[in-house]
Amino acid sequence: MSTRASLYVHAPFCRAKCRYCAFFSAPTGSAGPDAPALSRYLSALEAEMNRQAQIFGRVAAPTLFFGGGTPSLLGANALARILAALRQRFDLAPDAEITLEANPDSAAPELLRAARELGVNRLSLGVQSLDDAALKALGRVHTAAQVREAFHAARAAGFANIGLDLIFGLPGQSVEGWLSTLRQAVDLRPEHLSCYGLTIEPGTPLAEDATALAALPDEDCQAEMFLRGSELLEAAGYEHYEISNFAKLSGGVGQRCRHNMSCWRGEDVLAFGPAAVSTMAEETERVRWANPPDLAEWEALVLEGRAGQAGCEALSADIRASEALMLALRTADGLDLNTYAATFGHDLRNTHADLLIQLERAGLTLLDEGRLRLTRAGMLVSNSVIRALGFEFQEISANPENSS
Ligand code: SF4
């Protein structure tokens, strides 16, 4: 039974739906959630916390992440209520990393000051671009000037750990355009940068926009954005510690996001709110459940005392082994093959000897002191490398079970 887990709270409200977004969120208009909607959400969150505290007890939490949606739209009072409810039921460590995702248009100085006073010590700003035309095309409701205002307001409020989220590969974007965005972002001196390639999600307005789709940079151009962008950030003093994430080096140590690192290490997470996904150890197995991606459905579920009962599955050894491989290979720390063999009973140096040699010869992986890592060229084709190792592993590990 888990006694330690990171905590996650999904805030489901956004002012408007961005044109590329497939995350679950409820558009509220510029005023944000109305009082009755916010009150229902907060009551349901507390009911869900009660239920999970009954099951898992006073879980010790090294990190807490408010994600969304747009958590900064919740406002200071709601944040205070949620933090108080969590602290009442769980042991949030005194040095816990507490992250708030915020959009520049809802990161007002008063909110930022209140968040700091409540113990929030890390801010993750949803920037996406520093080009106003690109922001408009993405359906973002803020400008580049608002990004800078929010960043300086966060510093003034006492945030010493600020991350910026950016997207590259936008319609019409050139390599130089992307590098210019990165240079402007670096000029702000954030502690952390997340740089994701744009994915076209089916069903989003962007996926239906033929003009935008025709203007997408081709694969070679996107690869160059990734490679040159990573080089630029490394030269600016950032550690490339996960395929899409960069942490400012301070005294030789990168200011990595502790919450995400714990997810990438496959550690337990107890998550609250619609669309939130938890993974927890129970008496004899490890289970995962995904809350319904619908506010009313999630509220009904938790108020009926059935939190955690929708979409709950026990994770098989094969799934756990594949996920551990996939998550570790995304990070600069790579996969410790000895630990992996001890945990899952398969030493890839035996089961995948030929493939490992081929990958290294192709310059896609490195094996050093028992750790398997992707090179930067390997990161570009990470899905293929991981799929090759993971799928082959599943076939190998499935055989003994089939034959028994
Ligand atoms: S603010 Fe974030 S979660 Fe909300 S619609 Fe835009 S991309 Fe999606």
Image (cartoon, rainbow, N blue to C red):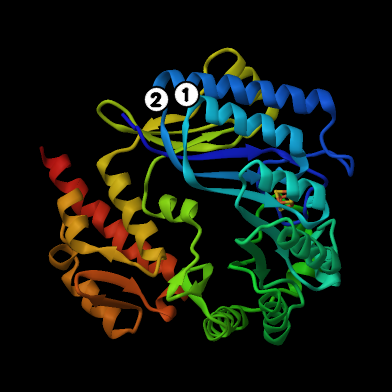
Residue 247: percent from the left, percent from the top? Answer: 52, 69
Q: Secondary structure at mark 1?
A: helix
101 relative position to 402: left or right: right
Assess mark 2: CB under 8 A from ligand 1? Answer: no
Which residue has dot 1 on it?
A: 52
Quick one: quadrant of the N terminus? top left
Q: Residue furthest top?
A: 304
Disc 1 packing (10 Å; few <14; some 14–19; many ≥20)? many
Question: Can residue 380 be seen at all in this image of the molecule?
Answer: yes
Circles 2 and 1 in contact, beta carbons < 8 Å: yes
Vertical position of residue 140 compared to residue 302: above or below: below
Vertical position of residue 343 compared to residue 206: above or below: above
Question: Can residue 69 be seen at all in this image of the molecule?
Answer: no
Give, as a three-letter code, the residue at label 1. Gln
- Residue at 72% across / 83% down in the picture? 180
Residue 167: percent from the left, percent from the top? Answer: 66, 67
The answer to which of 235 and 343 lies nearer the viewer is 235
The answer to which of 228 and 312 lies nearer the viewer is 228
- Residue at 25% across / 69% down in the picture? 371
User: Quarter of the image holding residue 81?
Assistant: top right
Q: Secondary structure at mark 2?
A: helix
163 relative position to 335: left or right: right
**Mark on residue 307?**
none
Quick one: quadrant of the C terminus? top left
- Distance, label 2 to label 1, CA atoms, is 6 Å
Total number of numbered discs in the rendering:
2
Assess mark 1: CB under 8 A from ligand 1? Answer: no
Residue 292: percent from the left, percent from the top? Answer: 59, 30
- Residue at 53% across / 67% down in the picture? 244
Which residue has dot 2 on it?
A: 56
Give, as a three-letter code, the residue at label 2. Phe
Residue 370: percent from the left, percent from the top? Answer: 19, 70
